[in-house]
Image: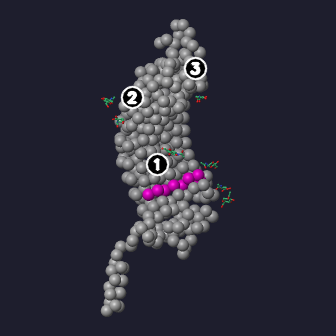
Amino acid sequence: MKKTIFIVSLLIFLSLPTPSLSVSKPCNKNDEKVLFQIKKSLGNPYHLTSWKKNEDCCTWYCLKCNKATGRVVELTISTRNISGQIPPEVGNLPYLQYLAFRKLTNLTGQIPSSISKLTHLTMLSLSWTNLTGPVPSFLSQLKNLNYLDLSFNKLTGSIPPELATLPKLTEINLSRNKLTGVIPESFGKFSKNFQSLHLSHNQLTGQVPKSLRHLNFSTVDFSRNKLTGDLSMFFGRNKTIQIADFSRNTFQFDISKFIFPASLTWLDLNHNKIYGSLPASLRGLNLQNLNVSYNRLCGNIPKGGELQNMATTSYLHNRCLCGSPLPACSKGSGLS
Ligand SMILES: *[C@@H]1O[C@H](CO)[C@@H](O)[C@H](O)[C@H]1NC(C)=O
Ligand SMILES: *[C@@H]1O[C@H](CO)[C@@H](O)[C@H](O)[C@H]1NC(C)=O
Ligand SMILES: *[C@@H]1O[C@H](CO)[C@@H](O)[C@H](O)[C@H]1NC(C)=O
Ligand SMILES: *[C@@H]1O[C@H](CO)[C@@H](O)[C@H](O)[C@H]1NC(C)=O
Ligand SMILES: *[C@@H]1O[C@H](CO)[C@@H](O)[C@H](O)[C@H]1NC(C)=O
Ligand SMILES: *[C@@H]1O[C@H](CO)[C@@H](O)[C@H](O)[C@H]1NC(C)=O
Ligand SMILES: *[C@@H]1O[C@H](CO)[C@@H](O)[C@H](O)[C@H]1NC(C)=O
């Protein structure tokens, strides 16, 4: 009798789901196999010596598992002496949400198309490496992607318009590459939650698309490109932009009638061809930085707010900008 009860309770115990709080599932065998392929593909680097058989792969360096499933959900390889290309096998870690290869001088080659299989990916960061080739349009298959950082590489070609179809994307950083062509018109179709667009230090040309007026950015950095035209789509009373760097391009427009939103704390417009006079709306801002040097501005610097607290270098090298902190306007000049 006792024996039967024991067996029955044992069977009940075995049929219960694993208590998720106390026990974590060991690493999935398929994921382990793929990780060994990745290690081999990277030349068995010293940095990955903790990746060895007989130790649960969920305990290895550079990765994280979902405790309930034993599937690898994060892989981050950074700041080590690793040479070679991104192993295409990373595409065979189907539950990956977070993938980063960072600060690897000797990581070369293109972004492998196998990455398009990682449909759970929310964050992709391939930054400070020596990757070449294009920003692949297949990234638009990663429908859960929230954050895309491909900055500090040697990527070439134009920006794929398809990225705008990613419904959850909130941040893109393609700064410090060798990208050419225009900013896609489609970028105006990013979701309402899109926040941050970094495209600085490339060779982008053409006008900033008017469609971007549909978005509420918090940060935009287009500095050091060859962009032209106007920037009015980022500003206006109802906008929420905080940081705006458009320095070192060839923007050419009259800034006099701009209304800068109260959210703006950082505005860098240096080295463009902006003309007109500085608008009074600048006085109402809690500015940490303003730089309008090397443009074609004229007239009085409005008095008030933070405008007189900026260094003179914020205003130098304009056509006829005057008034504190620059020298006073002379009679008949700068009163336009
Ligand atoms: C990069 O590769 C070169 C030559 O292959 C090697 O001398 C150098 O140590 C490597 N540097 C890093 C940080 O991996
Ligand atoms: C980096 O790795 C390469 C090749 O494995 C080796 O020749 C070089 O000495 C390593 N450099 C450092 C700084 O560890
Ligand atoms: C790319 O490689 C060059 C040497 O080939 C190196 O000087 C540079 O620092 C590397 N870039 C990055 C971002 O590691
Ligand atoms: C790229 O921009 C994002 C914000 O969109 C930022 O979080 C990230 O640190 C930047 N990357 C680098 C390498 O500066
Ligand atoms: C931008 O944000 C402001 C303030 O939150 C809001 O009034 C406005 O409707 C938003 N505009 C868009 C296009 O989402
Ligand atoms: C700004 O928002 C106000 C109310 O929140 C609205 O009446 C006005 O039409 C908006 N202006 C623009 C330019 O969107
Ligand atoms: C404004 O930009 C110019 C040009 O890059 C630079 O020389 C100057 O130091 C900047 N001023 C401030 C206050 O940042």
Instruction: Indicate yes or no whether the magenta region holds residue 102.
Output: yes
**Quadrant of the drawing holding the N terminus:** bottom left
Instruction: Indicate yes or no whether the magenta region holds residue 152.
Output: no
Q: Residue at x 46, y 48 (%)?
A: 148
Foreground: disc 3 or disc 1: 3
Q: Which residue is mark 3?
A: 325
Res 206 visible: no
Label 2 CB less than 8 angstroms from ligand 6: yes
Q: Position of residue 227 (x, y in %)?
A: 48, 32
Amino acid at circle 1: Leu
Q: Which residue is mark 1?
A: 148
Q: Which residue is most to the bottom? A: 1
Residue range in magenta is 97-104
Q: Which residue is most to the front? A: 2
Q: Position of residue 142 (x, y in %)?
A: 40, 53
The front one of 275 and 325 is: 325
Using the image, determine if residue 137 lies above or below residue 314.
Answer: below
Amino acid at circle 3: Pro
State which tag comes first along the sequence, 1 or 2: 1
Secondary-structure class at tag 2? loop
State which tag comes first along the sequence, 3 or 1: 1
Q: Which residue is mark 2?
A: 236
Specify the quarter for ligand 7: top right
Using the image, determine if residue 245 lies above or below residue 132.
Answer: above
Mark 3 Cα shell of 10 Å, populated few (<14), some (14-19), many (≥20): some
Q: CA distance from mark 1 to mark 2?
A: 28 Å
Q: Residue at x 48, y 35 (%)?
A: 243
